[in-house]
Amino acid sequence: MRPQNQLHILFSRREIAATVSRLASEIRQDYHEKYPLLIGILKGSFMFLADLIRHLDFPLEVDFIGLASYGKGTQTSGKIKVVQRLQSPIEGREVLVIEDIVDTGLTTAFCLDYLRREKPASLKLCALTDKPSRRQVPVTIDYLGFTVPNKFLVGYGLDLNQKFRNLPDICFIEEED
Ligand code: PRP
């Protein structure tokens, strides 16, 4: 019989909501007078960013950058491509990058290097999840939601072959016969 993907909840929607709220408090403390520009890395960060900014009751702007690293399936290709450029200039801005997961770190490291060349006033990173066991390049995460085990995660924006982004919980996949 063909193996099926079994989904198991790692972080429930309630745990995610509490963590997003906690991250928003930390960000609020540091940025409420800075008129920051939050940059979501597409596609995975869209749900996290949308929930996060609902908690941020101070002036800010939002932009997106489209980066892609993974080919099909669960293996990274190691090559990062800009598939959608920023709309706004970031020179002199207080920039906070919003990422759903830091895995090998290649995407985030590429993104931070790419943005740093545009001379923002400051550049920090908020990641909902961090999988340090897979890291290939060092990445400093300034605001972190969850440290996660070395399992393939889907849901809450995270995908497998573009599927499962709509799940409200963060789940891991196990292949079972
Ligand atoms: C995923 C995820 C991160 C990146 C993390 O994006 O959203 O951006 O991989 O992996 P890394 O730390 O090993 O680079 P992906 O390239 O799959 O595109 P997506 O956001 O459109 O799903």
Image (cartoon, rainbow, N blue to C red):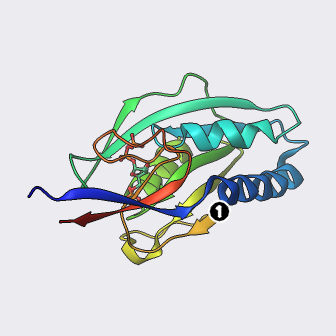
Q: Is mark 1 on a helix, strand or loop?
A: strand
Q: Position of residue 90 (x, y in %)?
A: 63, 33
Q: Is residue 135 above or below residue 92?
A: below
Q: Pick whichever, 159 or 115, lies toward us.
A: 159
Q: Is residue 110 above or below residue 91?
A: below
Q: Where is residue 31 in the image (x, y as percent from the top left)?
A: 83, 47
Q: How many labels does the image show?
A: 1
Kind of residue sitting beneath label 1: Gly
Q: Is residue 162 left or right of residue 155?
A: left
Give the residue drawn at x 61%, y 44%: 48
Crowd tier of the residue under label 1, counting other residues whose Cα lies within 10 Å: few below 14, some 14–19, many 20 or above: many
Residue topped by disc 1: 145
Give the residue drawn at x 61%, y 24%: 88
Q: Position of residue 164 (x, y in %)?
A: 40, 43
Asked where in the image residue 50 lies, by quadrant, the reply is top right
Figure quadrant of the N terminus? bottom left
Give the residue drawn at x 64%, y 40%: 49
Q: Would residue 49 be visible to someone looking at this image? A: yes
Q: Pick whichever, 6 or 128, lies toward us.
A: 6
